[in-house]
Image (tube, rainbow, N blue to C red):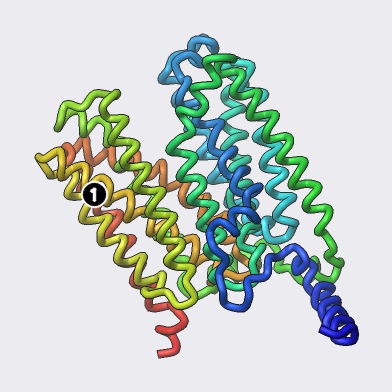
Amino acid sequence: MTGEAKSTAASAKAPAEAADPDAAGRAPTGGGAVPGDWRMTRLLWPFMLASAVGLVPFTIYSTFLVPIARTADGGVAALGQLRGLGGLAALAVGTALAPLIDRVRKEWAAAGGLAVLAVSAALGASGDFLLLAAFCLLVGAGTAVLNPALTAAAADRFDNEAAAGRAATLITATQSLTALFAAPLVALPALLWGWQGDLWAIAAVSSVLALYFLLRGRRHDARVPAEKAGKPGYLESFRLLAAQPGVVPLLLVAMLRTAAFMGYLAYLAAFYDERFGLGPETFAVVWTLSGTSFFLGNLFAGRLLSAEKPRIPGERLMALALLVALSALVGVFFTQSLVLALALTALVGVGHATVAACVTTLLVRRCGPLRGTALSVNAAGMSFGVFLGAGLGGVGLALGGYPGTAAVLGGLTLVALVLARVVDRSAPSARAA
């Protein structure tokens, strides 16, 4: 390229970056090409690390619930119920702050969420009952901001929809992998410094990451007041989001899918113990199988959806995965064969992971500049789904045993499948036809 050509290209690039302040921070993807997973990981590793850290505080709490209860002079049941405060806080904060995710630098929102996690971990390390209650509330509130901010920020790093969707699903896949391995990873350091040392370590790591994202946000913040003024208002953001074709049923699919899956997981150990006599030590293998299936399903579904021309549209893949998840979930509770139950357990994980990847990808693609709001509302809806699934699954178990649980959770999945067909009909190609 000649010097004159270089000068022309530079002058053309400067106005574009001035018009779009985030352009300098985005990774070019070469038109419609999607970078490989390793290249994306090199670009997104801070986001992936922060998303992993966000899952660790409650993992520590659940893993060391008995010694924590002993330190706090409280019962295990009472301390266990405090965990529910986090879900309620996530639901309230995630919904209330959803429109604000798109009005501030997403790196700053992530920094705020990490700072809240750091404070909560420091409070929890005290071992005081009231401070542990504050710990649960703050972890729920912090992750309600952190997770959608990280997912949206990762998607914003790329300049086409396929790459943006893949970036978002890499964040969710990281969370799945963390959920699988976090318990043994926090247990090993605890041999040296105890569960309180684990929480202090999380407080330190969260503080460092919060500073990193704060400085990153300041470095790339070149927005002008006119751009901020052009953002929709608080209530207007909800209205615009609801007006996006298929977004409301898509959010309902995510909530119902989460309810069915978390309700299923809540009673899976008891089912394997009663039906096949598997104690907690042996059931750990089943849990690992389920977690690995979910991680792999999320990872490969996200990769499939990131293709320039996917073999199957995300809407169709979501409906197919829900059908597989429905059949496998009901089958698990009725089978008398351990081998078949294990195979169906793996299928349930793969099916739900695929649906989760489809929901994230479709929200990123359909919502554009409102993706932060959409992902935040989605996270809040899934928090509600956790409580809904565990409660309804218990009602089904009380009324009809495990067939009753299968009927209730299968019914939730069936409603999600119907809504997935609504999402499919709202796809751009379907509307054009």
Q: Residue at x 48, y 13 (%)?
A: 67
Q: Residue at x 69, y 56 (%)?
A: 100
Residue 403 seen from this side = no
In this view, 338 is above or below 325: above
Residue 235 seen from this side = yes
Callout 1 environment at 10 Å: few (<14), some (14 to 19), or many (20+)? many
In the rendered view of the protein, which quadrant contains the N terminus?
Answer: bottom right
Residue at the outermost bottom position: 433
Q: Quadrant of residue 203?
A: top right
Is 189 displayed left or right of 413 in the figure?
A: right
Q: Position of residue 311 (x, y in %)?
A: 37, 75
Q: How many marks?
A: 1
In this view, 27 is above or below 68: below
Is 269 displayed left or right of 40 in the figure?
A: left
Is 167 displayed left or right of 400 in the figure?
A: right
Q: Position of residue 286 (x, y in %)?
A: 28, 36
Q: Quadrant of residue 43?
A: bottom right
Q: Nearer the viewer, residue 176 or 356?
A: 176
Is 53 displayed left or right of 288 in the figure?
A: right
Determine which residue is flagged by label 1. 329
Q: Position of residue 319 (x, y in %)?
A: 32, 66
Q: Amino acid at mark 1?
A: Leu
In the rendered view of the protein, which quadrant contains the C terminus?
Answer: bottom left
Residue at the outermost left position: 336
Q: Residue at x 44, y 16 (%)?
A: 66
Residue at the outermost front position: 2
Q: Position of residue 287 (x, y in %)?
A: 32, 36
Give the secondary structure at mark 1. helix
